[in-house]
Image (cartoon, rainbow, N blue to C red):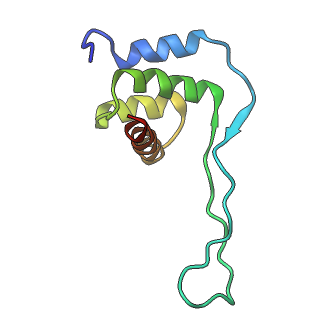
């Protein structure tokens, strides 16, 4: 990892690109029926929709560091307006996918 490149550098690069008003849906969810009681349908789990500029920021940082620390998550959270937990889960998912490809 190149120590001279910081989270702020990624954010500046991502901001320089054009912002699109479109959003990307990660995936649709089905009803979750846990346990043996199938008579009571569970509510669908809410999914996060990432906007294009948010994805650019996250991808730019992921290219530098696959495991952001608390400080980096806080900066990314402020920049993307996403919660720290959402960012951590998305990085975990991307890292898992990245490692399965290798």
Is residue 31 shown above or below 74?
Answer: below
In the image, residue 34 lies at what x, y percent? 55, 80
Specify the quadrant that holds the N terminus: top left
Specify the quadrant that holds the C terminus: top left
Is residue 54 shown above or below 64?
Answer: below
| Number of numbered discs on residues | 0
Q: Residue at x 57, y 29 (%)?
A: 54
Q: Residue at x 63, y 58 (%)?
A: 46
Q: Residue at x 28, y 35 (%)?
A: 69
In the image, residue 94 lies at what x, y percent? 45, 39
Q: Residue furthest right?
A: 22
In the image, residue 42 lies at what x, y percent? 65, 76
Which picture quadrant has residue 19? top right
In the image, residue 28 lies at what x, y percent? 69, 54
Q: Residue at x 32, y 11 (%)?
A: 5
Is residue 91 shown above or below 11?
Answer: below
Is residue 34 shown above or below 46?
Answer: below
Query: In the image, is 61 to the left or to the right of 55?
Result: left
Query: In the image, is 26 to the left or to the right of 93?
Result: right
Which picture quadrant has residue 14? top right
Query: In the image, is 57 to the left or to the right of 6?
Result: right
């Amino acid at each position: 990892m190149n120590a001279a490149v910081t989270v702020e550098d990624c954010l500046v690069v991502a901001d320089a690109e054009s912002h699109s008003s479109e959003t990307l849906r990660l995936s649709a969810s089905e009803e979750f029926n846990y346990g043996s009681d199938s008579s009571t349908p569970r509510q669908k789990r809410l999914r996060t929709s990432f906007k294009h500029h948010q994805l650019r920021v996250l991808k730019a940082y992921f290219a530098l560091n696959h495991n952001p620390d608390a400080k980096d998550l806080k900066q990314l959270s402020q920049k993307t307006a996403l919660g720290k937990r959402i960012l951590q889960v998305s990085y975990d998912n991307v890292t898992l996918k990245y490692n399965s490809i290798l």
